[in-house]
Image (cartoon, coloured by chain):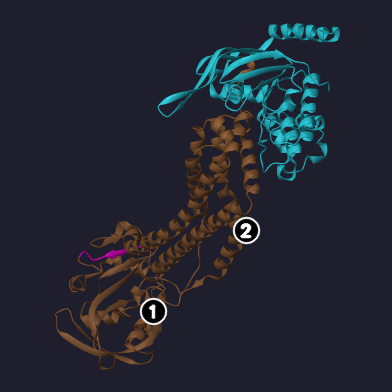
């Protein structure tokens, strides 16, 4: 093994240990079953995972491997059938509707494959939305929204409606919306699936930069090779099981 | 745990979001709002017309026929002419005193038959003091001649009698003996109150008392505002609720009939909102999922959709006000003329001036807002059962 490779591998191992010690997501023996007809389909089986602060990790695998299901449970949009998913120190299964809404609003940002921008709102309104729920004063809100739009390079599009944006721009708005509240965790479900290569790299670079500058934990669900190039940690899922969990070298931003 | 403290979004947020979504929906919103605003204006207009008619009819009936109440002979029934024969009594001194003070006006009622141009027609003769001041009847014309009588315009037209003509009348006196004489039509008056017109022949009380031999007698007395019920004697006091009961019943039935029309209109408008809501919820599943992912509870999303649906009614009220207020005020000034009014047989002026009370406007707004909120809430309840993960994928059935 060349000396340089050894050093970087050692650094990753040390870093991984550090993250383990301060995990913000801890998943223990988690299974998820969905009723299908008279039986059940098991989407996740006995998953054990931990995510620390500032991770840039990806759940990778083919369709139906359980990536989105796991992301939904971590995001408190769904609950495990068995086992536990502890996010920010609290089991998502134990949260009531209001608590889980508060968890999502304050601590988790979502980025979707289909962008999911609110169509009748402007770019500014879309980004502002999460802050409106927090009752943040208008002046602070405006500052935060403009800052988030600057991060993604869309300060000049504040008044545009989603229909007027390209796919890449829409996904950048989506990133700004997820980051405006400076959450600890961002969950991105196939964020590049609807984008061309250039836009994919652009938004991945943006997310990587935000991860490095703000220390936000990013978890992707993807099977896009382009995304994998940026990941620091790759968790391969197959048939609802963790097949491999590895630290990887990434493209430098 | 502080970071899990439930969010309490500003109450205005739901309205703000609803407003943005409604404006964003464009033409669909304005179609719903237009139909609903039309329902608003029609409900207020129709009820305003009925209320205006009611006020006019009550006022005219009081002024022309019933005064502030009536004192009836115990045998008297205005709908049964066979009671007239026995329904008369001498006016005692107490009553006479009140008559002199214009507190009461005595009326003597007698069945009779008239023969206009040789035709025979049953009528009711009513004797009233020519100098009375309580009713609006132009009784001063009864002083024009010893045998002066007056009739209403409707009766004059139906019997083809004109002012200045004479009319042969036959009646029975108090002993049951037939008598007849020619009377002079001194006046044909115009009144909105058909019950003082159709089949009524008005003559002076003295003349009728003389013709029937019922000296100093009356069948009923019309009371003025100054009448104190302590002096009733044998006479039975009938208040306005009793005397106007038939009129109220007719107006209520008209109101009920009209209600069917505007409830149908309202239902059409509400169905449009309901359909829009159902469509919205299916079409906007991803949006609903996104709201939840961004930190709203399902109930908060239900609230947004309910407010959005009911906001149609607020916009409809504003739109209705924009074109309805000038229209309704114009109608209030000009009134609405009904050419058929004379033939209806009920108290109705040729021109009705609608009356829009604050209660009518407030109750109409409440009716529309509450009903549109209910039809908005019913489909929105489905959101509370949605799984956010399915909503985000837009795969709900």
Location of mark 2 (residue): B322
Magenta segment: does it hold B71?
yes
- Tell me the element at label 1: helix
**Chain letter behind tag 2:** B
Q: Nearer the viewer, residue A44 or B370?
A: A44
Does the image show residue A94?
A: no
C-alpha separation, residue under disc 1 versus residue under disc 2: 49 Å
* Picture colour for chain A: cyan
Does the image show residue B345?
A: yes
The answer to which quarter of the image holds residue A69 is top right
- Which segment did they paint magenta? B68-74
Say whether marks 1 and 2 touch (CB < 8 Å). Answer: no
Q: Is residue A186 above or below residue B37?
A: above
The answer to which quarter of the image holds residue A134 is top right
Q: Nearer the viewer, residue B250 or B283?
A: B283
Location of mark 1 (residue): B139
Name the residue: 42% across, 79% down: B190
């Amino acid at each position: 093994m060349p000396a340089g490779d050894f050093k970087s591998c050692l650094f990753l191992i040390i870093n991984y240990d550090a993250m383990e010690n301060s995990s913000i997501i801890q998943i223990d023996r988690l299974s998820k079953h969905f009723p299908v007809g008279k039986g059940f389909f098991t989407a996740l089986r006995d998953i054990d995972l931990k995510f620390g602060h500032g991770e840039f990790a990806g759940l990778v695998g083919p369709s139906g491997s359980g990536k989105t299901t796991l992301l939904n449970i971590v995001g408190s949009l769904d609950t495990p059938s068995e086992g536990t998913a502890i996010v920010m120190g609290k089991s998502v299964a134990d949260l009531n509707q209001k608590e889980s809404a508060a968890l999502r609003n304050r601590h988790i940002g979502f980025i979707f494959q289909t962008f999911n921008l609110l169509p009748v709102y402007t770019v500014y309104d879309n980004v502002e939305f999460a802050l409106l729920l927090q009752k943040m004063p208008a002046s602070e809100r405006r500052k935060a929204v403009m800052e988030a739009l600057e991060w993604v390079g869309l300060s000049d599009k504040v008044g545009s409606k989603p229909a007027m944006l390209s796919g890449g721009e829409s996904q950048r708005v989506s990133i700004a919306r997820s980051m405006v509240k400076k959450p600890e965790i961002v969950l991105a479900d196939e964020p590049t699936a609807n984008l061309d290569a250039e836009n994919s790299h652009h938004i991945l670079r943006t997310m990587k930069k935000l991860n490095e500058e703000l220390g936000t934990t990013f978890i992707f669900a993807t099977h896009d090779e382009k995304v994998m190039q940026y990941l620091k940690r790759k968790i391969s899922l197959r048939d609802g099981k963790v097949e491999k969990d590895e630290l990887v070298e990434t493209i430098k931003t | 745990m502080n970071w899990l403290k439930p969010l309490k979004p500003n109450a205005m947020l739901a309205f703000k979001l609803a407003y943005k979504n409604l404006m964003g929906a464009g033409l669909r919103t304005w179609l719903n709002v237009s139909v609903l605003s039309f329902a608003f204006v029609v409900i207020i207009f129709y009820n305003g017309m009925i209320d205006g008619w009611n006020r006019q009819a009550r006022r005219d009936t009081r002024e022309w026929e019933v005064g502030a109440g009536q004192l009836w002979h115990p045998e008297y029934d205005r709908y049964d002419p066979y009671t007239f024969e026995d329904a008369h009594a001498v006016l005692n001194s107490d009553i006479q005193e009140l008559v002199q003070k214009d507190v009461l006006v005595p009326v003597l009622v007698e069945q009779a038959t008239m023969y206009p141009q040789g035709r025979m027609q049953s009528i009711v003769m009513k004797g009233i003091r020519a100098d009375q001041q309580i009713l609006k009847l132009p009784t001063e014309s009864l002083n024009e001649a010893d045998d002066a009588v007056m009739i209403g315009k409707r009766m004059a037209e139906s019997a083809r009698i004109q002012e200045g003509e004479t009319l042969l009348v036959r009646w029975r006196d108090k002993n049951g003996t037939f008598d007849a004489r020619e009377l002079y039509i001194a006046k044909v008056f115009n009144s909105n109150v058909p019950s003082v017109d159709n089949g009524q022949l008005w003559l002076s009380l003295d003349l009728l008392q003389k013709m029937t031999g019922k000296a100093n007698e009356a069948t009923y007395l019309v009371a003025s505002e100054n009448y104190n019920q302590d002096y009733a004697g044998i006479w039975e006091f009938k208040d306005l609720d009793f005397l106007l009961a038939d009129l109220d019943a007719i107006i209520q039935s008209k109101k009920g009939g009209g209600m069917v029309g505007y409830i149908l209109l309202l239902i059409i408008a509400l169905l449009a909102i309901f359909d829009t809501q159902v469509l919205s919820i299916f079409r906007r599943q991803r949006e609903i999922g996104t709201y939840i992912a961004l930190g709203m509870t399902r109930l908060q999303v239900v609230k947004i959709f309910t407010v959005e649906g009911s906001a149609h009614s607020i916009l409809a009220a504003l739109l209705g006000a924009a074109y309805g207020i000038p229209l309704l005020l114009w109608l209030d000034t000009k009134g609405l003329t009904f050419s058929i009014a004379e033939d209806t047989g009920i108290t109705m002026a040729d021109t009705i001036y609608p009356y829009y009370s604050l209660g009518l406007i407030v109750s109409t707004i409440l009716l529309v807002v509450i009903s549109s909120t209910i039809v908005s809430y019913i489909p929105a309840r489905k959101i509370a059962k949605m799984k956010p993960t399915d909503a985000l994928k837009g795969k709900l059935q």
